[in-house]
Amino acid sequence: MRDTHDFARLTNLADSIYAVAMTFLAFTIQVPAPDGEPDGDLARHLGAMLPQFGTLALSFLIAARLWILHSNMHRVITRGNDALVALNLVLLFGIVLILFSAEVLSLYPLSRLSITIYAANALLMLGMHVAIWRYARTRPHFFVEDVPPGYPALMIRHSLQIAAVFIGSIVAGWFVPRAALYVWALLAPIIFLQARQLSRMARPARG
C-alpha cells in the first residue's frame, strides 16, 4: 500500500466540503408563505420555525467542532496511504450527509427516528476521526516531527467524549424524544473544556 500521499490536496478538499456544508445549512430553514393577516402572521410563523433555527445552530456547532478536529489532525498528519485517504473520504461523506440529517431533524424535531438519524450521522463522522487517529499513530512516519507524545490520544479522547453525548441522546430520545435535546446541550460545555485542555498542550506546527 503506497505511503506517498501528500495530504495538502486532501486538506483543501476537506476545507471546501466543510465550507459548503456549513453555508448550505441555512437552506434547511424553510420560510412559510404569509397568511392573510396584515403582517402575514409573522410572529407565529417565526415561533413555529424555532426547531429549524435550533437545528441550524446545533449543526453549525457540530460542523465547526469537527472542522477544528480535522484541522488539528491535518496539522500533524501530513502524509498517508490509500487506506488513510479512504477513511478521510468516509468522514467527508458524513459532512455531506449533515445537510440531510439536519433537515430531517428540523422538520421532525421530536421524532425518535429523526433524532437517531441525526445522532448516527454525527457518530459516523466522530467514528472516522477515531479510526484515522488510531490507524495513523501506529505509523509515525505519517506525522510531523514535533508532535507531543500524548496528542493523538488526546484527539481520540475528544472525539469519544462528543460521541458519548450522541450515543446518550439516542438512548434518551427513544424513551423521551425531548430529552435528547437536553443531552445535546452538554456539547457546548464539553467543547469549551476540550478547547481549554488543548490550549495547555503545545500545538505542533505544520512541518
Image: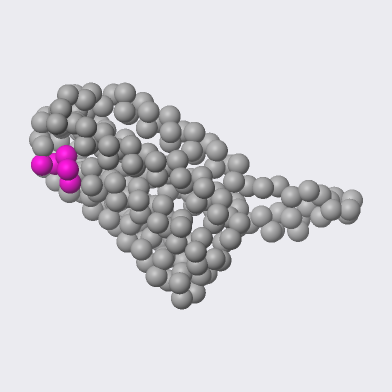
Magenta-span inclusion, residue 44: no
In the image: residue 116, left or right of residue 9: right
Percent coordinates x, y for residue 14 in the rendering = 37, 32
One can see residue 181 in this view: no
Q: Which corner quadrant of the image does residue 79 belong to?
A: top left
In this picture, is 174 found above or below 74?
A: below
Which residue is at a point 49% across and 64% down the rendered structure image?
A: 113
Disc tally is: 0
The one nearer the camera, 70 or 199, is 70
One can see residue 1 in this view: yes
Percent coordinates x, y for residue 62 in the rendering = 42, 48
- Chosen colour scheme: one colour
Q: Which corner quadrant of the image does residue 185 belong to?
A: bottom left
In the image: residue 149, left or right of residue 48: left
Percent coordinates x, y for residue 78 in the rendering = 21, 28
- State which quarter of the image contains the C terminus: top left
Q: What type of secondary structure mainly makes up the magenta span?
A: helix
Which residue is at a point 43% across and 36% down the rendered structure image?
A: 18
- Farthest residue toward the front? 1
In this picture, is 18 found above or below 124?
A: above
Q: What stretch is highlighted in magenta?
A: 134-138
Which residue is at a point 29% across and 46% down the rendered structure image?
A: 128
Which residue is at a point 46% across and 33% down the rendered structure image?
A: 19
Magenta-span inclusion, residue 137: yes
The one nearer the camera, 113 or 134, is 113
In the image: residue 119, left or right of residue 153: right
In this picture, is 29 found above or below 112?
A: above
Percent coordinates x, y for residue 1 in the rendering = 14, 31
In the image: residue 171, left or right of residue 100: left
